[in-house]
């Protein structure tokens, strides 16, 4: 039957066609990829740190080598000079020279040289009560042989006793002279009634007293004077007042105090010599101690706040000038000197530049 066939067929369902999707805008282009190096590995960092450590080590080692190869430090110089642990500093000084080094009835010393010795001792690490002054005569200054209270000879550490620098003394291997700490000159002192003296030649035939082994003895002998050499300058002035001598001749700074104390009985003469007397400290064969003395003198010279030298001059020498008119008793400024060779770390107090 047609109807059965029609009903017996399974009818196919027709799906409607899907509507086409609306076209979408293209996505924005991606940023260009940057070229990147390979990732740093842990080994690379270790190598970098290793290079930095090697550079730092080289700098430190190089700095140490330069430091170690230089001159000794101040601490090393103290050890070499045998100052470490030392309780007393023995200093040989004159004891009969007013204004320079004079011992009073109590045994106390005073004067310009005494103040200079205290200044140096302080830089060496000694308090004033750790400084012992011993009397020394002119001929014993090179040997550093002073005498104690019992008259025994004692080898002192320093000699600060109007000791002038000469070529002969510089050639003596047993003498170790510092740079000068005072400039003065040779002059002549007579009694007030003596005629004016302007040159050593005017003393020809006259009896003149000076210090034995001093720098004044040679020029006096060459002038034709009848020279007597005493061990102590005070003996010369005692003889002058007693008319045993006609004149006394030595460094002006040594004699100025006697003239000032004479109350007008003595007359000081400038004799026009060009030679400058340069007083220095003798440390003998102790070269490390000499360098430390140089350092003390240099600090006094280079540090404008250090007025110890100027105060010593104003206290002891300047008051003598009025009684010694027309005579250049002593230069009123400390002689310049070069900085000694002492090794220092960069952070330590630097020394000033040389001023001479």
Image (tube, grey):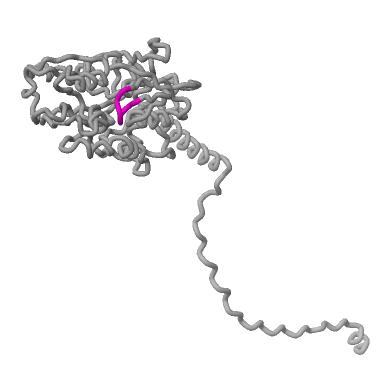
Q: Say which residue appears at 90% left-offset and 85% top-offset.
A: 5
Please tell me in which quadrant of the rendered image residue 63 appears: top left
Q: Quadrant of the N terminus?
A: bottom right
- Residue in view at x 17 percent, y 31 percent: 268
* Quadrant housing the C terminus: top left
The correct choice, above or below, for 193 with respect to 144 in the image is below
Q: Quadrant of residue 339?
A: top left
Residue 107 position, x and y percent, is 42, 23
**Would you say 140 lies left or right of 84 here?**
left
Check the image and name the residue furthest to the top.
152
Q: Is residue 69 visible?
A: no
From this viewpoint, which residue is outermost toward the bottom? Answer: 3
- The residue closer to the viewer here, 249 or 2, is 249
Q: Give the x, y percent position of residue 27.
A: 58, 74
Viewer-proximal residue, 347 or 15? 347
Q: Residue at x 7, y 17 (%)?
A: 205
Vertical position of residue 50 compared to residue 145: above or below: below
Quadrant of residue 81 within the rendered picture? top left
How many tags in the picture? 0
Residue 212 falls left or right of residue 176: left
Q: Magenta segment range?
A: 96-102
Q: Is residue 182 visible?
A: yes
- Residue 144 at what x, y percent from top left? 33, 15
Who's the residue at 8% across and 22% down the image? 203
Q: Is residue 5 or residue 221 the one in the foreground?
A: 221
98 is within the stretch colored magenta: yes
x and y percent of residue 314 in the render? 31, 39
Specify whether residue 282 is painted magenta.
Answer: no
């Amino acid at each position: 039957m047609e109807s059965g066939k029609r009903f017996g067929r399974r009818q196919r369902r027709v799906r409607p066609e899907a509507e086409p999707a609306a076209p979408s805008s293209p996505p924005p282009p991606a940023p260009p990829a940057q070229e990147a190096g390979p990732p740093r590995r842990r080994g690379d960092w270790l190598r970098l740190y290793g290079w930095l450590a090697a550079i730092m080590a080289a700098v430190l080692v190089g700095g140490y080598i330069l430091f170690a190869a230089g001159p000794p430090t101040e601490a090393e110089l103290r050890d070499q000079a045998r100052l470490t642990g030392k309780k007393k500093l023995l200093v040989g000084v004159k004891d009969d020279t007013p204004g320079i080094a004079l011992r009073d009835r109590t045994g106390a010393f005073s004067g310009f040289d005494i103040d200079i010795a205290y200044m140096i001792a302080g830089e060496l690490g000694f308090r004033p009560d750790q400084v012992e002054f011993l009397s020394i005569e002119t001929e014993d200054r090179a040997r550093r042989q002073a005498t104690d209270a019992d008259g025994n000879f004692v080898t002192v550490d320093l000699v600060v006793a109007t000791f002038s620098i000469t070529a002969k003394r510089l050639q003596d291997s047993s003498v170790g002279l510092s740079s000068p700490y005072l400039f003065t000159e040779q002059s002549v002192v007579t009694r007030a009634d003596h005629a004016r003296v302007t040159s050593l030649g005017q003393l020809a035939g006259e009896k003149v007293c000076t210090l034995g082994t001093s720098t004044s003895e040679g020029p006096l002998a060459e002038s034709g004077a009848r020279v007597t050499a005493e061990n102590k300058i005070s003996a010369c002035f005692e003889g002058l007042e007693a008319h045993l001598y006609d004149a006394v001749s030595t460094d002006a700074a040594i004699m100025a105090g006697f003239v000032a104390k004479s109350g007008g009985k003595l007359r000081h003469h400038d004799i026009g010599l060009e030679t400058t007397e340069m007083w220095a400290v003798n440390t003998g064969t102790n070269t490390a101690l000499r360098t430390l003395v140089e350092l003390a003198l240099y600090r006094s010279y280079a540090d404008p706040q250090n007025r110890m030298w100027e105060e010593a001059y104003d206290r002891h020498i300047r008051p003598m000038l009025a009684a010694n008119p027309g005579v250049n008793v002593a230069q009123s400024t400390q002689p310049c000197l070069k900085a000694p060779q002492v090794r220092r770390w960069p952070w330590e107090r630097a020394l000033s530049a040389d001023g001479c």
